[in-house]
Image (cartoon, rainbow, N blue to C red):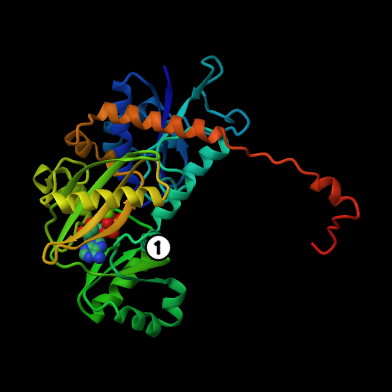
Amino acid sequence: MKTIGVFFGSRSPEHDVSILTGQLIISGLKKCGYNVIPVYIDKKGKWYSDARLASMKFFSQNPTDLDKKLESFNIDFNKSSGKIVKQSGFLKGNVVFDIAFPAFHGQNGEDGTFQGLCEILNVPYVGCDVTSSAITMDKVLTKMIYKANDIPTVDFVSLNLNEWRLDKKSVLQKIKSLNLPVIIKPARLGSSIGISKAKNQKELEFGIEVALHYDEKVIVEKAVEDLMDVTCCLIGNDNPTPSLLQESVFSSGFFSYEDKYLKGGGAQTGNATKSIIIPARLNKKVTQEIQDAATKAYQVLGCSGIARVDFLYDKKTGRWYANEVNTLPGTLYHHLWKKSGIPFEDLLKKLIGFAEERYHRKKQITYTFNSNILTQASSNKLSLKGI
Ligand SMILES: Nc1ncnc2c1ncn2[C@@H]1O[C@H](COP(=O)(O)OP(=O)(O)O)[C@@H](O)[C@H]1O
Ligand SMILES: [Mg+2]
């Protein structure tokens, strides 16, 4: 029986959402018969691994003093090479994780950082790799890749804190070309945190200040009016399978944090059934175009395992635009996969299979290169003088 470490929480504004995803994955994996070890990183960055962490009840009681209650978790880089090892007390011996299953959202986990740790340890892990996770965390870089690959996306301007503080006027001048209304977002955040819509100059400047509060990099986009929020999940490695399209209905302005997670249990979690329409109310041609664009985005961004590509559809013009990519869709969008014919437990098994496939394929790659550069460095042929 495989032992799977489920990692969640971490220093991210989306910390709480990650707990929901983590809990769902833990209970699903247990039902599949895997041996599951929960690993929780708290808001300050402290790691814990304790059986009590595998329960939503534990978190809903707002636990404090975790240090005193829970077993902490430290990675021993020596012991964890090629596997992750949990030291379980002198008598119980060590527990070896076969695979890491990240359930993080946002910074310090979904952004390539945790994936980098797994690469260094040479441990198989579920979901996207370092590069695709890092690029898709940044909405500006993602859109640059869309543009380079002819994937339609809304026009945008990117700015950073330094530019804004030094020369607000030039930044505002650049944004002018987009024409109001615009949508302002922190470039590397999610869950609609820090996002606003500006219809006039005052709202624009205020919106930028708010977004800069969450990230030093901000993206300002032309607003799509008559908006339909459409999303397509994909699973797989080289040839991903797209899900049906989901249309998410929101209550005011845009798909907000409240719509996503709170109203009726949240559309993003699959609970607010009234706000979720599957398949999206789009004709066959547009549906196919969006699924094809989602597949292309997944491939050019180098995604693997699972990801979700979001689209903005203008109901008036019938045009659609690729928006952002989430490499770890909240709760894995299990409700959409279920409607697409893949029950949750099958989805989890498939994701573990894709992780193993990528790991074994990477093993074929040569990471060594024999040369006599070091011998030469000490001879006259290759002098290090001046380095
Ligand atoms: N250019 C846009 N025009 C209109 N609405 C937008 C635009 N960009 C985002 N939105 C709205 O804001 C929501 C959140 O934006 P998104 O880019 O998906 O960020 P997040 O990572 O926070 O989910 C979208 O689901 C959509 O409802
Ligand atoms: Mg989104």
State the residue in front, 163 or 339.
339
Residue in the picture at 16% in, 68% down: 225
Q: Dot 1: within a 10 Å radius of its alpha carbon, few (fewer than 14), some, or many (20 or more) residues?
A: few
Judged from this view, the residue extending furthest toward the right is 380
Instruction: Please give left or right for residue 113 compared with residue 334 in the image.
Output: right
The quarter of the picture where residue 119 lies is: top right
The quarter of the picture where residue 328 lies is: top left
User: Can residue 194 be seen in the rendering of this structure?
Assistant: yes
Residue in the picture at 37% in, 21% down: 34
Look at mark 1 in the image and give the residue it sits on: 148
Quarter, ligand 2: bottom left
| Quadrant for the C terminus in the image | bottom right
Q: Is residue 305 above or below residue 163?
A: above
Judged from this view, the residue extending furthest toward the left is 274
**Where residue 114 sits in the image (x, y, percent)?**
47, 43
Element at badge 1? helix
| Quadrant for the N terminus in the image | top left
**Where residue 246 sits in the image (x, y, percent)?**
18, 47
Judged from this view, the residue extending furthest toward the top is 91
Mark 1 C-beta closer than 8 Å to ligand 1: no
User: Can residue 192 be seen in the rendering of this structure?
Assistant: no
The quarter of the picture where residue 386 lies is: bottom right
Q: Is residue 112 above or below residue 144?
A: above
Q: Amino acid at mark 1?
A: Ala
**Where residue 268 sits in the image (x, y, percent)?**
21, 46
Instruction: Please give left or right for residue 377 compared with residue 302 in the image.
Output: right
